[in-house]
Structure formats: C-alpha cells, structure tokens
C-alpha cells in the first residue's frame, strides 16, 4: 500500500507533536514544584499523587490502545478519540494550574484533576502516535514525517522547559497554564483536521488477553521494546541529573542547566533531518545502531568535564545522537506493526503503541529510584561541598549509567530481527 499524503498534510500531522511534548514537559518539569514549593502542599502527599499518576498513566496506554484497535466508525478508529479528548485535555491542563482549596482539599483537587488529565492525555497522545504507521507506509515517508515530528516535538520540549519561569514570573501560574493549553489546542486542531485514516484497515476482533499474548509473542516487538526501555531510561536520567551536575560538579549557576539542556535540544533540531536521510539510505536497524552508539559515546566525557563550556560542547554531541533515536524509535515500532499485520491479519497500532508506552513508563520511574539511591549511597548533602564519592556519583549519572543503559539497548537493537527491504513492508530474519 503506497501513500500519497501531501507535504502540507505531513507537516500538519507532525505539528501535533509540539502539543504532546509541551503538555508533557511543562507538567513533568513544574507541577511538583508549583504544588509543593509555591502552594505549600506536603511533599509526601504530592509524591503519593504522582505515584498514582504514573500507575494510572501506564495502565491506560494498553487499555486505550486495545479499545481504539477495536473501534469502527465513519470517522475512523483514532480520530474520534482525539476529537473527543483534545478540548477536555486542554481544559484539564489549565485547571491544574488554577488550584482550589487549601491543605487536604487542595491535595484532593490536585489528585482528581491529574487523574482526569491522564485519561484525556493518553486518549489523545496514544491515538496520535498510532496514526503514524497507518498514514505513512513507506520508509521514505516515515523517515521524513518522523523527522518533522521530532522537530516540532523538540520545540514543544523547549517551550515547556524554558518558558515557564518567564511566564509565571510575569503573569502568574494560572495564566501560564492557559496560554500553554491554548497553543497546544491550536496545533491539535490543525493535526486532527489534516489527518486521514486508511479506510481499508482490518480491525482487531480478538479479546484483550489474547491481544496481549499475540503482542508479546512477536519477537521483533520484544527486542524493540527492551531496547526502547533502556533508551528511555537514559533520556529520563539526563534532565534529572543535569541540575546536580552543574551545581555540585561544575559549580555553575542555575543558568548552567539552561545552557546544557539548550545545547542538547537545539543541536538535535537540525540533526533530525540528517538522521532522516541516513534512515532512508541504510534502513532502520543499521541507523538505530549508529545513533545509539553516538549517543552512548557522548556520555563518556562527562566523567572528566570540569568547565561549563566543555559540558555544553558535550551536550551538543548528546543532541546529535538523541536526534537519531527520537527519529528512529517510532519507525522501528511501525515496522513491527507491519510484520504483525502479516501474522494476524489485523492492524494493531493501538496495542503496540500502548504496550510500548506502558513499558517505557517504568523506565522513567526507574530513573527516579536510581537517582535517589545514588545520591543517598554516595553521601550527597543538600547545598554543601560534596565529597569525592558524591561528585563521582553525580558524574556517573551523566556518564556510566546512561552509557551502560545504551550498551544494553544496543544489544537488543542488534538482535532486532527485522531487516530492511525496499519499502516499509519489511523482511524478517534476513541477514544484515
């Protein structure tokens, strides 16, 4: 099946990733700080709410994936959920920045809004991702659209991380949330209006348990999702460790965080185009091995950097490899879905993206556990001169640990059995 989607439609679809990443980054980066440090809610209560948020978010991914795979309507399987969910999603994102009540009441308000937000976010984000392999069916199209998606996604990340201090300082937290929600809603509307589902798609009719068993009997998916888990773990570790690295290892101000994160994200933007071209030339498996190798090796110098300038240069190198992995992960998963269609006779994008989301979510949670254990074990002390052990521990979170995680991911990607053919319909088990 060949797609003839126009460039305008490709760009419009890709722009939806700005909304998804803006919502996700702003929420993940600032919501705990806002409720704990600004509003004064007990940290333990907010931590409990965030644990519930993580569990519910993870479980919703396979649920909505399976549900949308089984949906049949004149508007398609994915678009109805996005149409229904995008306005409530924007409203709930806004509401979480307009707190009601104090103390326990504020905690229950936060928990309620966050769980409702989870429902709408997964409903929209998962179905947006599931459209990708269905709308774009050739390696060339997937490479092109994935690069545009990641460009928009990185812009969303930058807005979500860099702009909040400017906005909440000048207009307050609530108006900041409303502005972000309005921007995101505009891009979601553009994306949905321009998206078109394939009418000939065969729908899944089997039950949830059987679908799960089929999914994990797919060897290509198992290797892919294992590699993806370790990559996502390293992704989560970077922004969490950078503030400790700049403050306690480099002795830099908080602006050092901005410079390092900026170096990573800004350098990644032009590189997504280069990785798109490499993907078309060498195929997904070979290209992801190259991207992961560059990304992993870029971590090594952080064992030795003593200046912010050196760390910023190192951040540029990380951004080069990061861009490749961002472009390639969805392309690899799309190949897995194509192969599954030949086995099962059904297109099950929702279940595959849902289970991928469920599994990699725990990589983000593992990052928080690992970071806390390392700081505790090495004798980290807040706002103090750190011991040599603590400094090494902090360095390891930007070097040894992500490098080890990427090395494991490389092994799984090497074992990934789908080899490139002339289109997005891959061949299985051919030698590289």
Image (cartoon, helix red, strand yellow):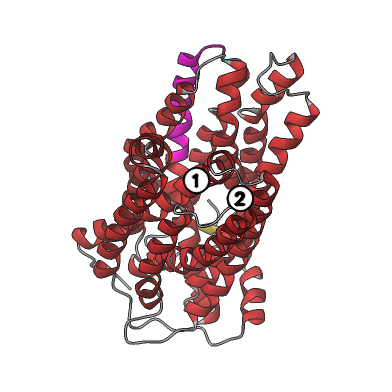
Q: Nearer the viewer, mark 1 or mark 2?
A: 2
Residue in the foreground of this view, choosing between 373 and 196? 373
Residue 215 to residue 166: above or below? below
Which residue in the protein does label 2 denote?
227
Tell me which corner region of the image, top left, top right, bottom left or bottom right, holds residue 380: top right
Estimate the x, y position of residue 238 in percent, counting from the top left.
56, 35
**Residue at position x 68%, y 51% from top?**
45
**Residue at position x 66%, y 46% from top?**
42
Q: Which residues are magenta?
A: 304-322
Of labels 1 and 2, earlier in sequence is 2
| Main secondary-structure element of the magenta-colored stretch | helix
**Residue at position x 48%, y 70% from top?**
349
Secondary element type, mark 1:
helix
**Residue at position x 74%, y 14% from top?**
388
Left or right position of 277 against 337: left
The reply to whether callout 1 and callout 2 are in contact (CB within 8 Å) is: yes
Checking the image for residue 288, the label placed there is 1
Binning the other alpha carbons within 10 Å of mark 1 as few (below 14), some (14 to 19) or many (20 upward) gives many
């Amino acid at each position: 099946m060949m797609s003839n989607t126009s460039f305008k439609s490709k760009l419009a679809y890709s722009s939806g990733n700005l909304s998804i990443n803006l919502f996700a980054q702003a929420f993940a980066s600032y919501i705990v700080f806002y409720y704990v440090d600004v509003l004064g809610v007990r940290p333990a209560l907010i931590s409990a709410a965030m644990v519930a948020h993580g569990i519910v978010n993870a479980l919703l991914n396979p649920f909505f994936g399976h549900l949308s795979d089984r949906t049949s309507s004149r508007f398609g399987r994915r678009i109805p959920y996005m149409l229904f969910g995008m306005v409530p999603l924007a409203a709930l994102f806004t509401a979480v920045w307009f707190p009601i009540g104090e103390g326990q009441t504020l905690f229950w308000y936060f928990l309620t809004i966050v769980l409702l937000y989870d429902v709408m976010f997964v409903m929209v984000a998962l179905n947006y991702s599931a459209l990708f392999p269905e709308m774009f069916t050739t390696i060339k199209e997937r490479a092109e659209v994935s690069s545009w998606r990641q460009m928009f996604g990185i812009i969303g990340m930058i807005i979500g991380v860099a702009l909040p201090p400017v906005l909440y300082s000048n207009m307050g937290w609530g108006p900041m949330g409303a502005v972000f929600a309005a921007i995101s809603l505009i891009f979601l509307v553009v994306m949905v209006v321009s998206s078109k589902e394939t009418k000939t798609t065969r729908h899944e009719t089997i039950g949830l348990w059987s679908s799960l068993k089929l999914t994990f009997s797919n060897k290509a998916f198992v290797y892919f999702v294992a590699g993806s888990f370790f990559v996502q773990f390293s992704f989560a570790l970077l922004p969490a460790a950078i503030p400790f690295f700049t403050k306690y290892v480099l002795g830099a101000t908080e602006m050092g965080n901005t410079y390092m994160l900026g170096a990573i994200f800004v350098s990644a933007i032009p590189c997504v185009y280069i990785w798109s071209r490499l993907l078309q030339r060498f195929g997904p498996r070979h290209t992801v091995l190259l991207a992961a190798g560059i990304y992993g090796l870029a971590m090594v110098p952080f064992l030795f950097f003593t200046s912010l300038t050196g760390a910023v240069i190192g951040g540029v190198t990380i951004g080069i490899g990061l861009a490749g992995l961002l472009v390639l992960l969805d392309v690899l998963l799309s190949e897995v879905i194509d192969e599954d269609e030949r086995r099962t006779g059904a297109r099950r994008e929702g279940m595959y993206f849902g289970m991928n989301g469920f599994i990699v979510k725990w990589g983000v949670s593992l990052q928080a556990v690992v970071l806390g254990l390392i700081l505790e074990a090495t004798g980290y002390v807040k706002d103090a001169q750190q011991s040599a052990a603590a400094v090494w521990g902090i360095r390891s979170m930007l070097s040894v640990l992500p490098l080890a995680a990427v090395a494991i991911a490389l092994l799984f990607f090497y074992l990934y059995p789908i080899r490139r053919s002339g289109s997005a319909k891959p061949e299985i088990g051919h030698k590289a």
